[in-house]
Image (cartoon, rainbow, N blue to C red):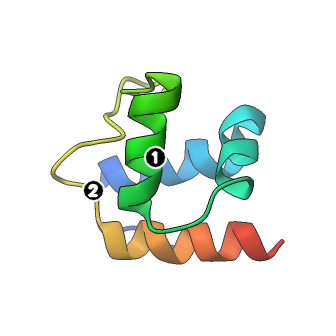
Amino acid sequence: MTYSNYATANVALWLSEDEGLYKIVKSTEGSYKDLQAIFLEEFQLIVTPDLESFHGRDLDHHELNVLLHELRED
């Protein structure tokens, strides 16, 4: 998939390729906004290992919601 900007592509990469983040995605439900809350409240996750924010304004939530749906169907 081609993403609309670097921030979204970076977050998508880490959600789909990092085993720990992938397990969190698979064990949760809801939208990317819901996942952001889980990342912050339960895991204190703010940025990717590349220092891109999981909570940035530039993130395309629609694209990330599509990714979450695809990952959860695996």
On residue 58, which mark appears?
A: none
Q: In this view, does 64 lie to the left or right of 72?
A: left
Q: Label 1: how many residues lie within 10 Å, few (<14), some (14-19) or many (20+)? A: many
Circle 1: residue type: Val
- The mark found on residue 11 in the picture is 1
| For residue 19, side relative to residue 33 (left or right) | right
Res 2 visible: no
> Would residue 68 be found to the left or right of residue 5 on screen?
right
Q: Is residue 12 above or below residue 47?
A: below
On the picture, is 21 further left or further right than 66?
A: right
Tell me: residue 35, above or below residue 1.
above
- Measured in 3D between alpha carbons, the distance from the residue under mark 1 to the one under mark 2, in whole angstroms, is 8 Å
Residue 59 is labelled as: 2
Callout 2 amino acid: Leu
Q: Where is residue 63 in the image (x, y as percent from the top left)?
A: 41, 73
Image position of 15 with respect to 51: above or below:
below
Using the rendered view, name the quadrant where residue 56 is placed.
top left
Question: In this view of the protein, which residue sits in the foreground, 23 or 53?
Answer: 23
Q: Where is residue 17 in the image (x, y as percent from the top left)?
A: 71, 45
Please report contact status of discs 1 and 2: CB closer than 8 Å, yes or no: yes
- Residue 26 image offset from top left, x and y in percent: 73, 56
Q: Where is residue 23 in the image (x, y as percent from the top left)?
A: 76, 44
Which residue is found at the position 36% from the left and 27% from the top? 46
